[in-house]
Image: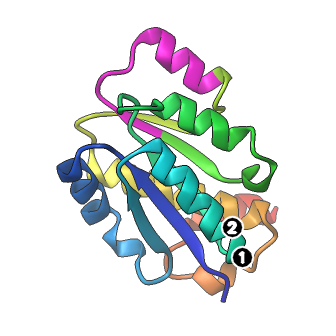
């Protein structure tokens, strides 16, 4: 079975731990990875891609040392290897201009403010990873226990 990874990026370890806890139900069907910076995330993506693994969703904070979340997600959006990777901005400090840049430049699929509602986040990630599976032409039945059935039905029509 193909390996699909969900990457969470935040410079605050306690936030990363909370996101990973919320997304724990996706394991072991998906790999959950965490990074504390944009550069670490980009290096991980290069490594996973070289190993032939898929990166289904990347969830990033915005305000981080070095590259911001919008810069990270824009780099992902502009990398042809990750054209189908779904991007989610999870932040508590983005300005209106940052949000516009995230939509227009990074082409994010979703935006969440901190603190987030865990159930809403999980449902969003479930939908996004299901969309990714279809976009990549993968066999959705391999992940039958965790895919979003509404998205599956919509995509099969």
Furthest toward the left, the residue is: 14
35 or 92, which is in the foreground? 35
The answer to whether residue 97 is magenta is yes
Which residue is at a point 81% across and 49% down the rendered structure image? 80
Q: What element carries label 2?
A: helix
Q: In this view, does 152 lie to the left or right of 102?
A: right
Q: Where is residue 148 in the image (x, y as percent from the top left)?
A: 55, 65
Figure check: 147 above or below 59: below
Magenta residue span: 89-103
The coloring applied to the image is: rainbow
Q: Position of residue 122 (x, y in %)?
A: 39, 57
Inter-mark Cα distance, 2 to 1 = 5 Å
The reply to whether residue 108 is visible in this rendering is no
103 or 13, which is in the foreground? 13
Tag 2 and tag 1, C-beta contact below 8 Å: yes
Q: In which quarter of the image is residue 53?
A: bottom right
Q: Mark 1 points at which residue?
A: 52
Q: Quadrant of residue 27?
A: bottom left
The reply to whether residue 94 is visible in this rendering is yes
Figure check: 106 above or below 87: above
The answer to whether residue 16 is magenta is no
Q: Where is residue 92 in the image (x, y as percent from the top left)?
A: 29, 27
Q: Mark 2 points at which residue?
A: 49
């Amino acid at each position: 079975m193909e390996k699909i990874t969900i990457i969470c990026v935040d410079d605050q370890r306690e936030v990363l731990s909370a996101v990973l806890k919320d997304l724990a139900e996706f394991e072991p069907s998906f790999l959950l990875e965490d990074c504390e910076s944009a550069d670490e995330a980009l290096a991980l993506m290069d490594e996973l891609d070289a190993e032939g693994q898929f990166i289904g969703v990347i969830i990033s904070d915005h305000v981080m040392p070095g590259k911001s979340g919008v810069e990270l997600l824009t780099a992902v959006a502009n990398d042809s290897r990750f054209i189908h990777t779904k991007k989610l901005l999870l932040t508590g400090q983005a300005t209106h201009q940052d949000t516009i840049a995230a939509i227009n430049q990074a082409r994010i699929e979703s935006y969440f403010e901190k603190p987030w509602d865990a159930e809403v986040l999980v449902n969003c990630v479930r939908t996004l990873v299901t969309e990714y599976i279809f976009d990549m032409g993968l066999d959705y039945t391999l992940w039958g226990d965790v895919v979003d059935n509404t998205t599956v039905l919509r995509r099969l029509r």
